[in-house]
Amino acid sequence: MSGILAQFSLVGRVAIVTGASRGLGAAMALGLAEAGADVVLVARGDMTSLQEKITALGRRALPVAVDIADADAPELIMQATLGAFGRADILVNNAGIIRRANFLEFTDQDWREVMDVNLNAAFRLSQHFCRPLVAAGQPGKIINIASMLSFQGGVRVASYTAAKSALNGLTKLMANELAAQRINVNAIAPGYMATDNTEALRADASRNEAILQRIPAARWGTPDDLKGAVVFLASPAADYLHGHTLAVDGGWLAR
Ligand code: NAP
């Protein structure tokens, strides 16, 4: 491979993907491995079959079973990564949960748990990921998984909208502070993707129809739709991209 396509190669890179046990995270982890990276898979659930798929590609996969909201999770993840591979070049902050309730009934617990997983964990893991890179003067890539609700308000998802909107701002703040250290911080905002996260919406016939009517591409996104975007943002082809949130949304935001 030569020329521009070589710039999309991740051979020799190590990527950490949180929330890799299913859905978008599993597909992005596989996409990064298909582009050549070894991958650290972070989640609480079983990741054996993904690990096998990555190994079958000739890449290494290291499952790290932690609750990302635990205080010691960032340290455990970085220790496991550096212990196994000796380096970490790419971080995808993807782990996320959603809670649905009317604003007036929204509980403190549903507020706190979503903020802990979707925002606070990304903040803390990014710090732990960046410190050794900055100390060694090495480049890196951080990709935060944002949402349409980084731009819009939504309904019945107060903590999710707050966390994803904050993650969008944090992406820009981190880009501003880290760009000169050759660490690119960007985000992907998936549109409406068919995963467990959106199962309730798809099961509700009228919500499902209303959502489909508004998507110019006229279909729900699939986890595989994110592979190209994550590989691009993780690769040298994106070396001059900083603080951008790339919508992969079938045109939803353009509507
Ligand atoms: P999903 O299918 O529900 O998967 C969520 C992933 O996050 C799982 O791997 C889960 O693993 C992990 N996770 C959740 N809580 C965790 C915790 N405390 N510790 C470690 N891992 C945890 O969701 P998805 O649709 O793929 O969503 C992935 C990301 O994309 C989320 O940030 C979500 O907000 C965002 N997003 C999704 C959509 C969509 O339409 N689906 C749209 C926009 C943005 P375990 O349960 O095994 O721990």
Image (cartoon, rainbow, N blue to C red):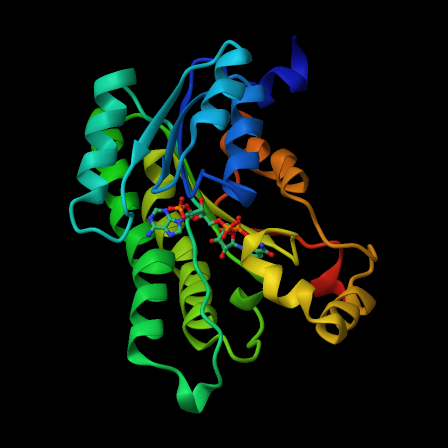
Q: Quadrant of residue 84?
A: top left
Task: Name the side, left or right, on which 250 lies relative to 88.
Answer: right
Q: Quadrant of residue 179?
A: top left
Residue nearest the viewer, comparing 142 with 239:
142
Residue nearest the viewer, comparing 42 with 14:
42
Q: Is residue 185 above or below residue 239?
A: below
- The percent coordinates of residue 1 (x first, y second) are 65, 8
Q: Is residue 158 above or below residue 225?
A: below
Residue at 43% across / 31% down in the picture?
47
Residue at 30% across / 36% down in the picture?
65
Q: Quadrant of the C terminus?
A: bottom right
Q: Residue furthest bottom?
A: 104
Residue at 23% across / 42% down in the picture?
74
Task: Name the side, left or right, on which 177 lies relative to 240.
Answer: left
Residue at 39% across / 83% down in the picture?
106
- The percent coordinates of residue 236 (x first, y second) are 52, 26
- The percent coordinates of residue 44 (x first, y second) are 34, 42
